[in-house]
Image (cartoon, rainbow, N blue to C red):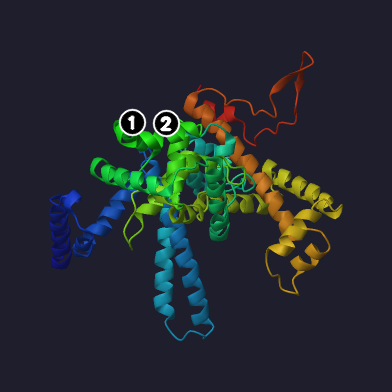
């Protein structure tokens, strides 16, 4: 062995020993650049060796999610570098051919390594194995859906669809303008439902004392109705007149009274009753707990100004301006539908469903069934005069692109619904409850099927269950 190789080996061993002595809990991000480069390369090689070991079957969702995110990030970098290399070859971006080739080779190798690891991991996960068995669904999409969805938090396929951003009609993305419009409307509606003829000075006096009391007692700084009611009960002798007047107006010490007092005191204050009304409103349709958590998170981001000890209208508007679904999942579902579309002539059942649905949507469009939607889209934004889309909308029809997107969404929604059914079997060992549209109903004493056209999945569940020896 040459002296250079021997020194390099000793250098690696020293770095290895030094790294073992580090306490990960106390490791600062600034320390990372100081770690030995040789050790990092050696560690990556060992990681690949361990990851591709046939007996290495255990992997967490977080690890898979991290690998999928890293793969797509590297993919975007590789595309950018390919464009840069193309510019170098064409003489547009100067010289640097050799360096660009070296970078491109390194990025492609890393991308291939991550794909190989994910391909290996997904072979040992029943849900991923079933997804990959469908024509057009690759390991990256299968791993991404598995890593971001959680069957234990969903009672129906509709939950999966909403979280994937495929249920826009029921859970719309309000955006900033929509949130600024709808939040004050609902707050005003609640205020009108709880009118109390209590002098403002009495309410101010009550609330100022209560907030001072709450600040000392409550550590998290969030005010709710229950705390107010406890305070009213503890200090009832101080506010006999106020409480009597509430009883005269037909209000008892309940959440209605608390909501009324809050709204009378500060028009910008948001209570849990307000959140409840907001969540169940037909225009929003969200879980109250989810809305409340979003408001608390949004409130924690506030850096400027003094925080008030309650959620204010501005907090809710900012929280509701964000999409009610997982953006990464929506992108993954689009990629899945696009892959299925591209391989629709390769014997895929979902590909055939896409083709049939597109033909069906085209017939409806030509018959003028989407005239109202076309008019709404035409008014939604300023279209360029020379676009094919605007021309189609002006004729009361959706464009070919719109029709294609509708067929793609229909197909991927069916795939996600089948994914929920199979995942429920794997997790609980029993089939998910039958959707109400397929359940038998008693009509005039007879069992009547509402719908009988259940579409079976491309790959039977039994095939994968048997392979993994699941019930």
Q: Relative to the observer, which residue lies in front, 318 or 465?
A: 318
Q: Position of residue 168 (x, y in %)?
A: 62, 48
Residue 3, numbered circle: none
Establish if 44 lies above or below 434.
below
Label 2 packing within 10 angstroms: few (<14), some (14-19), many (20+): some
Quick one: label 2 or label 1, which is nearer the N terminus? Answer: 1
Quarter of the picture holding the N terminus: bottom left
Residue 191 falls left or right of residue 446: left
Establish if 213 lies above or below 78.
above
Residue 353: image quadrant is top right
Measured Cα–Cα span from mark 2 to mark 1? 8 Å
Establish if 79 lies above or below 195.
below
Tag 2 near tag 1, CB within 8 Å: yes
Hey, which residue is sitting farthest top in the picture?
Answer: 445
| Residue at (13% x, 53% y) in the render | 17
Establish if 130 lies above or below 67.
above
| Residue at (34% x, 36% y) in the render | 239
Label 2 element class: loop
Residue 413 falls left or right of residue 385: left
Q: Position of residue 152 (x, y in %)?
A: 46, 32
Q: Which residue in the structure is indicated by mark 1?
A: 233
Hey, which residue is sitting farthest right in the picture?
Answer: 367
Q: Relative to the observer, which residue lies in front, 251 or 1?
A: 251
Q: Which residue in the structure is indicated by mark 2?
A: 253
């Amino acid at each position: 062995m040459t002296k250079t190789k021997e020194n390099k080996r000793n250098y690696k061993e020293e770095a290895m020993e030094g790294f073992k002595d580090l306490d990960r809990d106390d490791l600062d991000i600034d320390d990372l650049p100081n770690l030995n480069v040789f050790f990092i390369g050696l560690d990556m090689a060992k990681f690949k060796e361990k990851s591709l070991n046939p007996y290495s079957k255990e992997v967490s969702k977080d690890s898979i999610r991290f690998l999928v995110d890293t793969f797509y990030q590297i993919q975007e970098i590789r595309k950018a570098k390919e464009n840069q290399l193309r510019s170098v070859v064409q003489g547009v971006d100067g010289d640097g051919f050799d360096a660009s080739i070296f970078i491109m080779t390194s990025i492609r190798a890393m991308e291939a390594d991550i794909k190989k690891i994910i391909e290996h991991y997904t072979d040992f996960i029943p849900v991923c194995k079933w997804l990959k068995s469908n024509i057009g669904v690759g390991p990256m999409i299968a791993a991404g859906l598995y890593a971001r969805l959680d069957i234990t938090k969903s009672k129906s396929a509709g939950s999966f669809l909403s979280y994937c951003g495929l249920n826009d009609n029921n859970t719309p993305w309000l955006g900033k303008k929509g949130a600024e419009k709808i939040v004050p409307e609902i707050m005003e509606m609640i205020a009108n439902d709880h009118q109390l003829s209590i002098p403002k000075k009495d309410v101010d006096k009550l609330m100022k004392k209560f907030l001072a009391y709450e600040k000392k007692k409550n550590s998290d700084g969030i005010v709710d109705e229950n705390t107010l009611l406890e305070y009213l009960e503890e200090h009832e002798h101080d506010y006999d007149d106020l409480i009597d007047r509430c009883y005269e107006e037909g209000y008892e010490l309940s959440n209605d009274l608390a909501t009324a007092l809050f709204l009378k005191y500060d028009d910008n204050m948001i209570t849990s009753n307000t959140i409840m009304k907001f969540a169940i409103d037909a225009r929003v349709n969200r879980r109250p707990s989810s809305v409340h958590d979003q408001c608390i998170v949004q409130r924690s981001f506030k850096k400027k100004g003094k925080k008030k000890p309650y959620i204010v209208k501005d907090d809710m508007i900012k929280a509701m301006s964000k999409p009610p679904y997982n953006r990464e999942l929506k992108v993954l579902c689009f990629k899945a539908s696009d892959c299925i579309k591209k391989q629709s002539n390769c014997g895929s059942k979902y590909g055939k469903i896409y083709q049939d649905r597109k033909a069906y949507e085209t017939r409806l469009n030509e018959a003028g069934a989407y005239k109202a939607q076309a008019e709404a889209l035409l008014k939604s934004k300023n279209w360029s005069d020379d676009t094919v889309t605007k021309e189609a909308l002006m004729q009361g029809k959706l464009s070919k692109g719109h029709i294609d997107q509708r067929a793609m969404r229909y197909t991927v929604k069916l795939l996600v619904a089948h994914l929920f059914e199979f995942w429920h079997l794997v997790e609980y060992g029993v089939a998910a409850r039958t959707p109400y549209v397929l359940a038998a109903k008693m009509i005039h004493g007879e069992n009547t099927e509402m719908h009988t056209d259940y579409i079976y999945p491309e790959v039977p569940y039994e095939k994968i269950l048997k392979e993994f020896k699941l019930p």
